[in-house]
Amino acid sequence: MREKKYVFVVGLDDFNLEKLNHLPESEECEFLPAVKLSEMRDVEEFSIPSLLETADRRINQAGRIDAVVTWFDFPGSVLVPVIAEKYDLPGPSLKNVMKCEHKYWSRVEQSKAIPENIPGFRAFDIYDDNAYDTIGFEPPFWIKPIKSYGSYLAYRIEDKEQFNECIEEAREHIDLMVEPFTYIFDKYKVSPEMSKMEEKMFAETVISGHQCTAEGYAINNQVEVYGIIDSILEGDTSSFARYDYPSRLDQKAQERIAGVSEKVIRQIGLKTSAFNIEFFYNENTGEIKLLEINPRMSQSHADMFEKVHGMSHHEVMLNLALDRKPVKLDKKGEFRVASHFMLRSFKPGIVRNAPGEETISRLKRKYLDFDILLNVEEGMDLDDMAEHHIDSYSYVMANIFLGAQSKKELIDKYNDVVEQLSIRVDPKEE
């Protein structure tokens, strides 16, 4: 019997481990935690040296490492190239990953290859009391940290008063992400110019349209986009209600988005890496605008690929890490369409009712394709929820995964699931 390959995961968690174990390649692999998810999420501070020491200790205890992967944003996406280089493994370079992760640097690189496909942008110093006036953009516009995940500390600005309020909050929390990010720049001498930036946030002009994400990979001189996912917003908010796959965009629009993706990935130089790129597509004008580049697969889309293709796109990530060209994802799944729903509360409060194991088991018997990541429990204060379940405007109480043969069937199933879950949030008492 051949010895199994040791694949170390930065941010290993049960949900994604199940997806990995469904892959045909899992028979030849053993998946081990380089860093556990709990060690790099919902912590008071990130210590990059400590996380790397943890990874090294586990790798040394195992005796070898054959591949390293992650599906998570910072610090996961940054730790992978550091570990890959140290152990001479396939993977992207740290510099090219940082060109994606440093949101301002990424915009600079994008402007060289696809200037017509990006918004106006400008970095600013959050400790400058005149920052609003120096930006030079008329509201509305967005302000964002040079590094974040989800929509943490990202705000749509409507006037100067709101800007000042948001900056106060940013000053209090921004170092959680920016300081360890800057450490990577300095420790590995990635870019003196970017590491010396005093500006910790930047402003962008508003872009709009149909939001979607291109999932792809780069290996050698090939850049391939293999799927486009629609991101559906919750009403007039900037928070996602669900992700839909396959995209409803026509083939020509999808090919144009893939073309823009290829141009910008080649400019950045990303190789031996999965990526996902978020876009806005204006269906009236045909205009394409790039929102952000993530140098990793999106685990939020994995269940949908599994339902439609018969296996998740973890397979793409895994094959790249094993120095193999990914195989084409054919549509051999049980469902024609699939969605990842995010059940949100847009107001703070106390959870007065949450489903138990019996309710969830009953739903799994009724809908064999149903899966859920429940983020609340009875008595919980939503403000105490894990940070990666909160954006600037809402709380994700549950992530719900479903497949169907039609969009109508999918929405009907979801509505029934929500009714059966019967989650209730009451306002806090004054």
Image (cartoon, grey):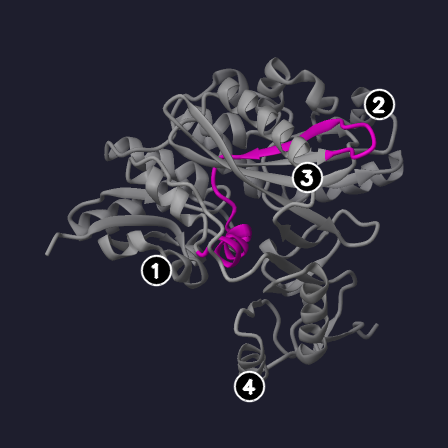
Residue that label 3 marks: 171
Q: Is residue 193 left or right of residue 273?
A: right
Q: Residues within 10 Å of mark 1 (few under 14, many from 20)?
A: some
Which numbered disc flags the more N-terminal residue, 3 or 1? 1
Q: Mark 2: which amino acid?
A: Asp
Is 17 above or below relative to 278? below
Please, what secondary structure does the residue beneath circle 3 have? helix
Residue that label 1 marks: 21
Measure the alpha-carbon separation of dots 2 and 4. 56 Å
Q: Residue at x 61, y 18 (%)?
A: 108
Which numbered disc flags the more N-terminal residue, 4 or 3? 3
| Residue 391 percent location from the top left of the image | 68, 51
Which numbered disc flags the more N-terminal residue, 2 or 3? 2
Residue that label 2 marks: 133
Please, what secondary structure does the residue beneath circle 1 have? helix
Tell which of 79 and 414 is nearer to you: 414
Q: Mark 3: which amino acid?
A: Arg
